[in-house]
Amino acid sequence: MQPADTDLQAVEPVEEVGVKESPKPAFQSASINFVKEGKEVVAAQGANLRIKAIENQVDLYTFGGKLMNCGGAGQCGTCIVEVVEGMENLSPRTAFEERKLKKKPASYRLACQALVNGPVSVKTKP
């Protein structure tokens, strides 16, 4: 028995009529309004709230927090902010936030754990 001969033909690509590639999404931004400081910051969607605050000289920490903060590792709970508007535009609370903020109002978040996905207004050092 001999292997069957196969005919390989070159196939030309077929153009689909009426199908357009969707354009790549443009840069998505999110605005962060720091209420007490009177600053509005534009950030890339998914930006970390603590990092954007520090980059824009917004002080998140009380005196004790300045001495004992973990540097954004999500271990100390000193970067607490109150979300005034746009809670739905932040990432969900992490397990650490649930434990650390269980006696705080639902509008409180740890800036180091919150990712910004749309417009949000926050109060620092509530």
Image (spheres, grey):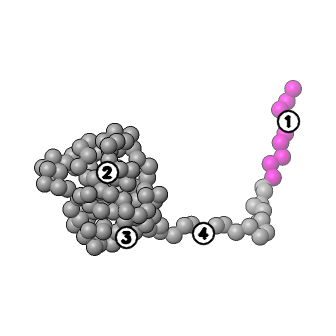
Q: Which mark is residue 23?
A: 4
In the image, residue 43 above or below residue 99: below
Q: Are marks 3 and 1 in contact (CB under 8 Å)?
A: no
Earlier residue among tags 3 and 1: 1
Measuring 70% from the left and 69% from the top, which residue is drawn there? 20
Amino acid type indicated by mark 2: Leu
Q: Is residue 38 above or below residue 13?
A: below
Q: Is residue 7 magenta?
A: yes
Crowding near the residue tagged with mark 1, few <14, some 14–19, many ≥20 C-alpha atoms within 10 Å: few
Looking at the picture, which amino acid does disc 1 mark? Ala
51 or 121, which lies in front? 121
Spatial CA span between label 2 and label 4: 36 Å
Report if the CB atoms under discs 1 and 4 are less than 8 Å apart. no
Residue bearing mark 1: 4
For the residues carrying marks 3 and 4, which lies nearer the camera in this image? 3
Which quadrant is the C terminus positioned in? Answer: bottom left
Answer with mark 1 or mark 2, whichever residue precedes in sequence: 1
* Residue found farthest to the top: 1
Tell whether 13 sits left or right of 119: right
- Residue range corresponding to the magenta coloring: 1-9
Q: Earlier in the sequence, mark 3 or mark 4?
A: 4
Residue holding disc 2: 110
Measure the C-alpha gap from mark 1 to mark 2. Answer: 68 Å
Residue 53 appears in view:
yes
Question: Where does residue 39 sit, x and y in percent of width and height?
Answer: 29, 72
Mark 1 or 2, which is nearer the eye? 2
Name the amino acid, label 3: Val
Residue located 64% across and 67% down the image: 22
Q: Do we see residue 47 in this rendering?
A: no
Q: Which residue is at the front of the view, 100 or 14?
A: 100
Q: Disc number at residue 42?
A: 3
